[in-house]
């Protein structure tokens, strides 16, 4: 073998040994921007139906008020259930075939299904299509996998915080948009508008997002070196603690949602303004999270993800308690905003630790399980909160949820001490 061939072989070996994040040093900022926009638009499209979903259910032939409420809840939750079921599968396929194909699949699939929802003829088709949107979609989940694996480890907390901000903004603005679009385009036309927004995200993903992925070598590739902060690989007790914590974040946020309108009404809000005030209170937690998600993610990069997780869990648990003692709706809104600010530091920090808890060729699958845990909490939260409210009273929802969060902080502290890693992990 001549000298030139040896140099070429050596160069190829060096390239193969570079980990996934190192190969995207020049792409990850642009990819992050597209993922933020795509997560924002897809979640706007998915959440904008909240104000008019009962009206659409009525248009599809459901008559009684109780049946309208029941089918509206089933249709809304079906998407989250679908995403919880398939997120690990899409994460595993992302490890095998690349992160960008999963983004394209999610955007195209959701654009098509969102348009089909506007052509539903009965409530069963509506529920089935909402479930299908969760099964084939999950752009925000796919974005977490891409950003979580491409971004340098020392910037992962900040980047995942920025991505979380885009998703939270979509969930916050979606119902506001949904309050106006039906008046302009009609209810069915609003779904077509949502599909068009997602299609725009799909085009940006196809033509702007860059990925250097070789399926033939990725499955056997390992990082060129283990950093001191990477921590042990495949630490299953830590992984279990992270999954439980991720589920609890969404469970805590959603536990009061089924009865928040009733609770706001008990604070003396007139029935004529009840829906509007309840909507403002619901939005406050997302607004608070938008303010601090990126900052707390960056803080996790500096002082360590475990520190942020334990601290935010304790603070959120403490903030839950005074919500049971408010005397005015604005006090509840302020406390919900404060709760959102403390919750915001959890998901980026958890995702960063989850990325480091497994080997590189399994990060997509791990982050997929993490997304599944989050959506499981989003599905279980309203159910658990409703049961507690019925059997123990409205105020008990805050006490039980706060206690669960503090217990989860103890679990996180145990997981932290069980792995011999540096505090900056």
Image: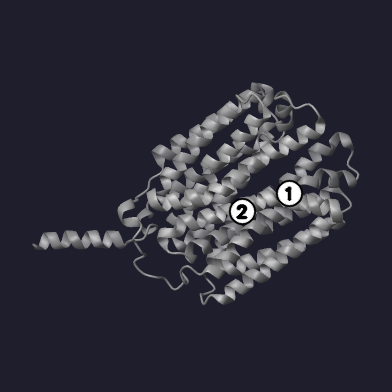
Residue 251 is marked as none
Q: Is residue 390 left or right of residue 368?
A: right
Quadrant in the picture for the N terminus: bottom left
Outermost residue, front side: 124
In the rendered view, does 271 fall on the left or right side of 154? right
| Mark 2 → mark 1, Cα distance in angstroms | 13 Å
Tell me if mark 2 has few (under 14), some (14-19) or many (20+) residues whose alpha carbon lies within 10 angstroms of its own: many
Display colour scheme: one colour
The answer to which quarter of the image holds residue 404 is bottom right
Residue with the mark numbered 2: 374
Could one spot residue 137 in this view of the protein?
Answer: no
On screen, residue 344 above or below 303: above
At which x and y percent is residue 421? 51, 75
- Asked if 150 appears above or below 77 in the picture, the reply is below
- Between 406 and 38, the one lying in front of the other is 406
Mark 1, secondary structure of its residue: helix
Q: Is residue 402 left or right of residue 163?
A: right
Pick the front one: 382 or 154: 382
Give left or right: position of 220 versus 393.
left
Give the image location of residue 208, x and y in percent: 40, 40
- The one nearer the camera, 417 or 156, is 417
Residue 282 is situated, as x and y percent measured from the top left of the image, at 74, 45
In the rendering, at what x and y percent does residue 295 appear? 59, 58
Quick one: SS at disc 2?
A: helix
Residue 382: numbered disc: 1
> Is residue 113 visible in this depiction of the protein?
yes
- Answer with mark 2 or mark 1, whichever residue precedes in sequence: 2
| Quarter where residue 76 is shown | top right
Name the residue at 46% across, 43% down: 103
Instruction: Give the residue drawn at x 81%, y 34%.
Output: 66
Q: Quadrant of residue 2?
A: bottom left
257 or 157: nearer the eye?
Answer: 257
């Amino acid at each position: 073998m001549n000298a030139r061939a040896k140099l070429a072989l050596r160069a190829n070996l060096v390239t193969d040994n570079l980990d996934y994040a190192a190969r995207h040093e020049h792409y990850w900022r642009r990819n992050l921007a597209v993922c933020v926009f795509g997560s924002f638009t897809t979640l706007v499209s998915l959440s904008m139906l909240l104000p008019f979903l009962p009206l659409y259910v009525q248009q599809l032939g459901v008559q009684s008020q109780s049946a309208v409420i029941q089918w509206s809840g089933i249709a809304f939750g079906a998407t989250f259930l679908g995403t919880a079921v398939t997120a690990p599968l899409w994460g595993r396929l992302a490890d095998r075939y690349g992160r960008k194909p999963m983004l394209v699949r999610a955007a195209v699939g959701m654009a098509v299904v969102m348009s089909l929802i506007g052509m539903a003829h009965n409530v069963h088709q509506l529920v089935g299509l909402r479930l299908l949107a969760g099964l084939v979609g999950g752009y925000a989940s796919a974005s977490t996998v891409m950003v979580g694996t491409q971004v340098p480890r020392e910037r992962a907390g900040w980047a995942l915080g920025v991505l979380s901000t885009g998703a939270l903004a979509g969930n916050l603005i979606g119902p506001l948009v949904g309050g106006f679009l039906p008046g302009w385009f009609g209810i069915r036309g609003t779904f077509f508008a949502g599909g068009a927004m997602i299609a725009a995200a799909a085009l940006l993903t196809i033509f702007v997002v860059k990925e250097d992925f070789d399926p033939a070598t990725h499955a056997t590739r390992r990082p060129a070196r283990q950093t001191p902060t990477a921590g042990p690989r495949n630490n299953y007790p830590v992984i279990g603690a992270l999954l439980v914590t991720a589920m609890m974040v969404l469970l805590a946020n959603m536990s009061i949602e089924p009865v928040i309108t009733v609770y706001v009404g008990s604070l003396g809000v007139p029935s004529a303004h009840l829906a509007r005030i309840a909507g403002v209170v619901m939005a406050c937690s997302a607004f608070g999270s938008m303010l601090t998600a990126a900052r707390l993610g960056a803080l996790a990069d500096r002082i360590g993800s475990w520190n942020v997780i334990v601290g935010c869990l304790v603070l959120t648990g403490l903030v839950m308690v005074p919500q049971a003692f408010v005397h005015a709706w604005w006090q509840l809104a302020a406390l919900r905003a404060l709760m959102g600010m403390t919750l915001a530091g959890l998901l980026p920090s958890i995702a960063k630790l989850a990325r480091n808890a497994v080997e590189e060729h399994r990060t997509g699958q791990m982050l997929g399980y993490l997304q599944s845990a989050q959506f499981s909490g989003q599905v279980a939260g309203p159910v658990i909160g409703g049961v507690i409210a019925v059997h123990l009273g409205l105020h008990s929802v805050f006490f039980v949820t706060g206690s669960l969060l503090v217990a989860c902080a103890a679990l996180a502290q145990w997981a932290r001490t069980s792995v011999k890693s540096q505090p900056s992990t």
